[in-house]
Image (cartoon, grey):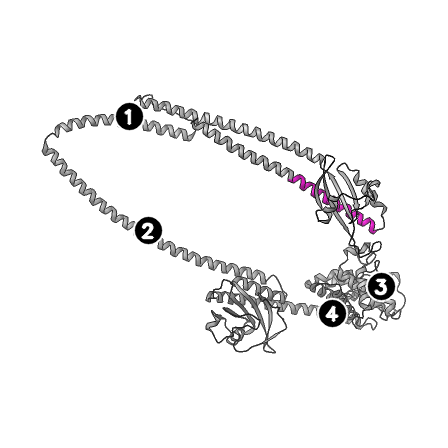
Amino acid sequence: MNSLKIKFLGLTAIILLIAIGMTTWYNLKTQRAMLHKLASEHGRLLAETVRNSIISDMSNGRNDRVVHILSKINSEPTIDKIRIFDETGRVLLSASDEEVGDLVSTSELMAYRTGNFAYSDSNAGSNLFSTIIPIYNAPDCYACHGSEKRVLGVLNLQLSLDELTVMQESGQKATMTASGVMLVILILTITAFLLVYVDKPVRKLVLAMDHAEKGQFDYARATIKSSDEMTMLSTKFNFMVQRLRETMESTVKNERELAITQEKLAHSEEIQSMNIALEERLKEIEYLNINLEERIEEIEEANYRIADLASELEEKNMVLSHAVDRLQALHEMGLTINATMELPKLLDKLSQKSMETLGGQIGYILMLNEMSGKMTVGGAAGVTDPIDNQMEIPLKPGGVSHWVIQNKQPLLIENVEHNREFSKMSRLGFIRESVICAPIATKDTILGTITVANPVNGSEFNSEDLELLSTIAAQASVAIRNAKLYEEQQHTYLSTVQAMVSAIEASDAYTHGHSDRVTRYSLALGRLMKLGDQQLKDLEQAAILHDIGKIGIDATILHKKGKLTPADIEVLKLHPSIGVRILEPIKFLEPIRDIVEQHHERFDGKGYPRGISGHEWRIEAKILAVCDTYDAMTSDRPYRNALPHTVALDEIKTHSGTQFDPAAAATFIKMCEEGLLPE
């Protein structure tokens, strides 16, 4: 059993068996995982769909449809059981009336309490997959259920996996059969390949070798064309046999000549002469060896020089790579600072990116107030204690920024211990070790300074770091200037539009100060409803400009003292849409257009101009609608006197859930009752 082909076939069969076996095992494992994943996702989606349908029907008061939904779903062949039980495990609703009031199994109750909302199970020989989804108590359900109850019920859906299991077993059989057939085909193919392309050519070569061994050179030839390699091997073999034949013939001839020569060299003089010649040849060989050693030394010296050149080249490559990294960092910095126009965010990003780019522990930007001659923190990164951006830092000797501003040039402090001129403790609450600082300036005006302190690797900053920070400061000065111009432009736009609103209100004594009051009410209500900073900013701008569209309404309708006709009302309803068209060219007011347009929409979808309902209504517009209506009711109008505060609150409470968003209305009433309504 020492045959190479037997060993090759055996090893190949083992490798194929292992590979196909592992592939088959992985496919079977993947099929099981896919079955579990399919059942999990199908059960979850179906359960969530059923839960949403149940919640929708119950919130609309159609409780009788819940049992109908459960019965209809339970009629599907893949659904084994569907029911709703409470947190104690008692069945509240089920497709089967007999099951109502029973207790669910301990395993199902424990699965819910442990948060295992999707798991496999078996019942009476059937494979099942259970999905559990809690039905949480929501504000819409408070009418029928108390708000203190967090979970109204638990939806339990059981899917039958019998059909999927049969499909999996069929797939497993097909996979095993295909793997076996593939293994047999591969082994037969490799066996045929060995016999045709390896074994048969080798036999021809062995036969030719036998002829060569016996000296039968005329028959010692092998012509093989089964492959390029075998063709080259047979050609080389034939050439070798031919050379062997020629060598043997030459050897026989040389032996004959040597015998004749030996007879001629029988005399001693001839032998001595040959010895002398041999010694001379040995001396020549020694001389050649010496020359060879000298050449080897020269080659070694050349190798050393090549190694030195390679070292210098590697050092230059490292310098070049470092320069490329710095350029890449500057490019990323440029992308970062050009991505925002809001000055506070810009300064924070500049501080963070500068610290990361230069590998510092702390980075910050101080902005110079030309009027007071003091500095404030514009942005900071890496500082552990909270920074008060309104804190003023005086320019005093010993401060890094004081030196930079006074000398109008960047500063490198490799080690503060060696520079007693500067204080070791920073006003931002950290200890300086190694610091670089550069001025942020436009032409001859110093805007502030940018500083990076204390490298994270414990080393010291160098002149290259200072040069990079100076480049970043140059970029920052342009970005800060652009951000300030952008803020000034926004302020100019907003002031212009606000002046237009004031002009509208000034023309009518009844609406004078309306926008200011609505703005104060809206901001107070927005803060109570936990709106974010950006939402409060949008709400403030929208409240100021919510009636800008009245510019396009005829003044006779706005100031009409009698009752408005239906035609007048339809014209007046156009002012939210007109306001959106007025604000459309102003790019930075884009986030508030929807709020301005929606401030006369209603929770029940009967408002104008679009008639959207509560879930489509922006929270800022919901707040604005309550505050706008309250101020309108408590202010004098040409056609009526102002309503009392209590009457206005009763109106808001009465129309909560129809005209007003319930949460916004309830919070506004609570704010008024607690005396938090701004004057």
N-term-proximal mark, 2 vs 4: 2
Provide the residue designation for mark 4: 498
Kind of residue at disc 4: Gln
Provide the residue designation for mark 1: 245
Residue at position x 14%, y 35% in the image: 274
N-term-proximal mark, 4 vs 3: 4
Kind of residue at disc 1: Arg
Residue at position x 55%, y 66% in the image: 362
Separation (CA) of disc 2 from disc 4: 81 Å
Quadrant for the C terminus, please: bottom right
Numbered label tally: 4
N-term-proximal mark, 1 vs 2: 1
Magenta region includes residue 46: yes
Provide the residue designation for mark 2: 303
Q: Nearer the viewer, mark 4 or mark 1?
A: 1
Report x, y in % for residue 1.
44, 26
Report x, y in % for residue 321.
46, 57
Q: Which residue lies most toward the front here? A: 106
Report x, y in % for residue 611.
81, 56
Instruction: Please tell me whether mark 3 sits on a helix, a strand or a loop.
Output: helix
Provide the residue designation for mark 3: 652
Check the image and report above or below for 65 versus 256.
below
Separation (CA) of disc 1 from disc 2: 45 Å
Instruction: Please tell me whether mark 2 sits on a helix, a strand or a loop.
Output: helix
Q: Which residues are magenta?
A: 33-62
